[in-house]
Image: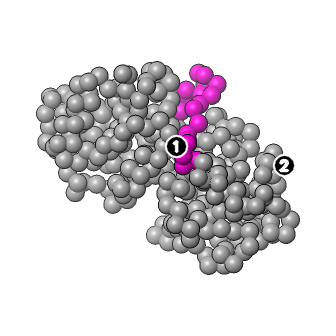
Amino acid sequence: MNRIAGIFDLARSGGSLGTLLILLEELEIQRRIQLAEAVEVVLVADAKDLALGIQRERAHAPGVAGLPRSANVSTLMTVVRAMSGVTGCHACFDRSALDEVMGLVRGGCALWPDPATLVAGGHSYDSTASIQEFHARTGSIPRLSVSAARLALARSYLSAKAGGRLAVAVHLKNNPAVSGQSNADLASWHAFISSCRRDVPAHFFLIGDDATNADFRALPNVTVALDDGIAIDGYLALIQAAGLFMGMMSGPANMALFGGNPYLIFKHPDHHAEAMALELGEADHYAFALPGQRVLRIRDTTENLVRAFASVTQKVSA
């Protein structure tokens, strides 16, 4: 059986949800290119150990102590196991696990990206370059998806809560440990969602574990998914199932980025400006975006939120 093993190097990726979702999209592309029947994911502390193991058939085991502080292995594995088409997930942090992965290699399992390329700095987990290149050659990309069972549960949940209104998944990144350039302007979002209560038949589902302004809970057109016990795999399913995603450029937003439904992702124009220019050029969307899928490098003021929402509402069915 033709298999691909995706290598998620926690040292080089930062162990973040966003970079993991980019890798999962790359693996879907590699599945097409290599006509693979199965995709597995290997989490490693440092690909150097794996690269040495492949070269020498023996290596010292990676150490757990080397994991980035941001890496939550349990959460990452939950995400991997939630995705459609992923048949296995391996946490390669000790000698026995390294031997297991080496068994995959000896069995002919293709690795993506190549560990030696990773160690040499030839692959960036934080770039969509290979995805855009595939789109340029083929005119499309595979769309990332959770398992059918999770997607069905998400659709049922949204339908029950939205009551026939447009279901909008929203992620308001709010990390007090970083500068405000990465965080949502909660006052602007509250004013926007409050105005929609009067004018638009929409219901907003706040996803994520970020600190949420208590005032949002008082709005009748808002559901806080965390309050219903929904966790990371459920958040991703809600993003995929919703008629529209809105929020800040963040890890969860990448689920929408590689999905098939409309989205409005906001990015502060001065935050990672050079990197965003490489990704998008002057456009307000990725090359592989579908109609209604926009990345807006503008401040998330109430006026901008209202204007952007109006620009896609007519194209989105409840």
Residue displayed at 45% across by 33% down: 27
Is there any visible trace of residue 236 in the rendered image? yes
Q: Residue 162 in the image: x percent, y percent?
A: 73, 61
Q: Give the number of the mark in front: 2 or 1.
A: 1
Instruction: Check if residue 305 falls in the magenta segment.
Output: no
Q: Residue 224 in the image: x percent, y percent?
A: 61, 68
Q: Is mark 2 on a helix, strand or loop?
A: loop
Instruction: Check if residue 143 falls in the magenta segment.
Output: yes
Task: Give neighbour class at mark 1: few <14, some 14-19, many 20+ (Cα, 10 Å).
Answer: some
Q: Tell which of 32 and 311 is nearer to you.
A: 32
Task: Give neighbour class at mark 2: few <14, some 14-19, many 20+ (Cα, 10 Å).
Answer: few
Residue displayed at 67% across by 57% down: 158
Residue displayed at 36% across by 22% down: 1
Q: What element carries label 1?
A: loop
Which residue is identified by label 1?
147
- Which residues, given as a range, are shown in magenta? 129-151
Q: Residue 112 in the image: x percent, y percent?
A: 38, 31
Residue 169 vs 115, above or below: the answer is: below
Q: Tell which of 152 and 122 is nearer to you.
A: 152
Q: Residue 238 in the image: x percent, y percent?
A: 60, 54
**How far apart are the two marked residues, 2 and 1, measured between alpha carbons?**
29 Å
Inspect the image, locate mark 1, and give the three-letter code of the amino acid beneath it.
Ser
The reply, left or right, for residue 34 in relation to residue 296 is left
Inspect the image, locate mark 2, and give the three-letter code of the amino acid beneath it.
Gln
Coloring scheme used: one colour
Counting labels gives: 2
Q: Tell which of 15 and 296 is nearer to you.
A: 15
Which residue is identified by label 2?
314
